[in-house]
């Protein structure tokens, strides 16, 4: 098939590259420097395996990036809209990039004679395909062109750090369509994928993505709430509690009981979730429901617990040391390992809250240290706060807070030599035996 992908961000670039293994794909952007870098084989974002895949597909001839000004739809089967849908200040989903993409496509559709499907792949509120995409296109195009143009929704389920394998080996593919043409186009697009394919209408596909992400976020906040209860019970560790819970066969994989299903990764106490999806999608679903006069106490609770978690951890540390006089090292800025995404990372909450009480803060990350300098939370940091080699500063540090479980931090037990140092392991990757001379703290343990 002939595919045009509008947007070369995380979803657009990875989806376009993976689809180019079977189809002809052009990724479209308005930024000439991004287009130029992509065509030179240089990704403008980090993802495991992305650089090699980009070089391979450029050489194959099935993939290239082009400027929107050079876009033609004359031989196109499917347009995938993969632009950003960030949160507005009030929590609503920002559809301005979607609107801009639709408006830009309209003049190009006047010359289309073949059947063409316009599919939204970005995460959008239910009703966006029907009430925005479809209505806008049909309002601005002559009626004789309407039968040629169909619409749909094909949500992505990519996890940063494993996005390429997630795309190529999916759990399922959701095919949201508004008519037989778009349904057939989507089935043909994914015909080589050996996984369940769920054929639904566009509104259902839009809702599936929101429920999927908010339900995963719910698991994280629920376990963090349980961990707060455990911290008030002597000698009860949330990690042991969850191990006992997850041995229930209903939480186990039927294929191999020795390999826990990936849902277990969302059922661990920690410092909260971040990234580009969970925070904004939970907010957007709550706002969408509220706009229909539906109260969402569970979704609101998910956000409340998550937003409070860094403060909860800081209060626990304050029981052991005067933070206003402490030197504190934050290990990890990316919201999860193997990604360069710092959006809504818990680190930003730690930086702000610790600075407000006067702590001397130092920050390290093996990949995205420089990105923090342009983030709003950098206003709370000094030039000396950014540490490229954290080992050199360890002797001066009073408190170490592990925020992102990068593999390089697994060496920490052998690197900490100063006695009575406070180690707060917010990801639960160690135990007290790893730091016999330090004060080891973690989430969900008194």
Image (cartoon, rainbow, N blue to C red):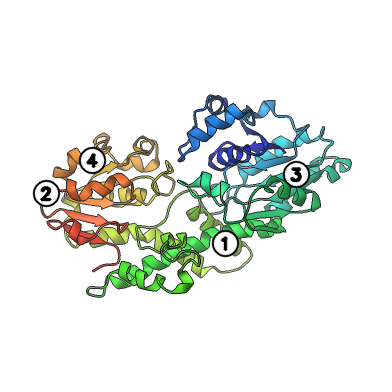
Q: The C terminus appears in which quarter of the rendering?
A: bottom left
**Label 3: element kind:** strand
**What residue is pinned by disc 1?**
211
Q: What is the quadrant of residue 241 in the picture?
A: bottom left
Q: Position of residue 317 (x, y in %)?
A: 22, 59
**What residue is pinned by disc 4?**
390
Task: Tell me the distance, in whole angstroms, between the alpha carbons under discs 2 and 4.
Answer: 14 Å
Mark 2 or 1, nearer chain start: 1
Mark 2 or 3, nearer chain start: 3
Task: Tell me the distance, in whole angstroms, between the alpha carbons under discs 3 and 4.
Answer: 51 Å
Residue 134 visible in the shown view: no
Residue 69 visible in the shown view: yes
Instruction: Determine crowd level at label 3: few under 14, some 14-19, many 20+ residues with C-alpha closer than 10 A.
Output: many
**What residue is pinned by disc 2?**
418
Mark 2 or 4, nearer chain start: 4
Mark 3 or 1, nearer chain start: 3
């Amino acid at each position: 098939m002939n595919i045009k992908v509008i947007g070369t961000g995380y979803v657009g670039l990875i989806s376009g590259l993976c689809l180019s293994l079977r189809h002809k794909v052009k990724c479209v952007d308005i930024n000439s420097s991004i287009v130029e870098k992509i065509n030179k084989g240089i990704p403008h974002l980090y993802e495991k395996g992305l650089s090699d895949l980009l070089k391979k597909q450029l050489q194959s001839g099935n993939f290239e990036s082009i400027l929107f000004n050079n876009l033609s739809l004359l031989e196109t089967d499917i347009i995938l809209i993969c632009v950003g849908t960030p949160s507005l200040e009030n929590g609503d989903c920002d559809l301005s990039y979607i609107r801009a993409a639709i408006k830009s496509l309209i003049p190009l559709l006047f010359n289309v004679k073949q059947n063409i499907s316009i599919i939204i792949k970005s995460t959008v509120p239910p009703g966006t395909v029907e009430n925005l995409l479809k209505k806008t296109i049909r309002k601005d195009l002559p009626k004789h062109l309407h039968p040629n143009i169909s619409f749909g929704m094909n949500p992505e389920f990519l996890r940063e750090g494993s996005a390429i394998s997630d795309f190529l080996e999916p759990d399922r593919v959701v095919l949201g369509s508004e008519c037989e043409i778009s349904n057939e186009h989507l089935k043909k697009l994914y015909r080589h994928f050996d996984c369940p394919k769920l054929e639904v209408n566009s509104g259902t596909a839009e809702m599936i993505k929101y429920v999927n992400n908010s339900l995963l976020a719910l698991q994280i906040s629920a376990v963090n709430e349980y961990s707060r209860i455990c911290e008030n019970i002597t000698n009860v560790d949330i990690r042991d509690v969850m191990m006992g819970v997850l041995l229930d066969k209903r939480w186990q994989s039927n294929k191999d009981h020795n390999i826990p299903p990936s849902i277990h990764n969302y059922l661990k106490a920690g410092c909260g979730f971040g990234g580009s999806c969970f925070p904004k999608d939970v907010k957007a679903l709550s706002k969408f429901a509220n706009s229909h006069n539906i109260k969402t106490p569970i979704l609101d609770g998910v956000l409340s617990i998550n937003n409070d978690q860094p403060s909860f951890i800081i209060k626990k540390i304050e029981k052991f040391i005067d933070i206003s006089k402490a030197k504190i090292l934050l290990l990890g800025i990316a919201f999860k390992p193997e990604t360069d995404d710092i959006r809504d990372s818990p680190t930003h909450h730690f930086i702000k809250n610790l600075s407000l009480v006067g702590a001397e803060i130092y920050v390290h990350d093996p990949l995205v240290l420089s990105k923090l300098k342009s983030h709003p939370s950098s206003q709370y940091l000094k030039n000396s706060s950014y540490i490229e080699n954290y080992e050199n500063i360890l002797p001066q540090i009073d408190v170490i807070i592990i925020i992102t479980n990068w593999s390089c931090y697994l060496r920490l037990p052998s690197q900490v030599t100063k006695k009575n140092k406070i180690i707060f392991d917010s990801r639960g990757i160690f135990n007290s035996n790893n730091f016999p001379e330090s004060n080891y703290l973690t989430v969900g343990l008194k």
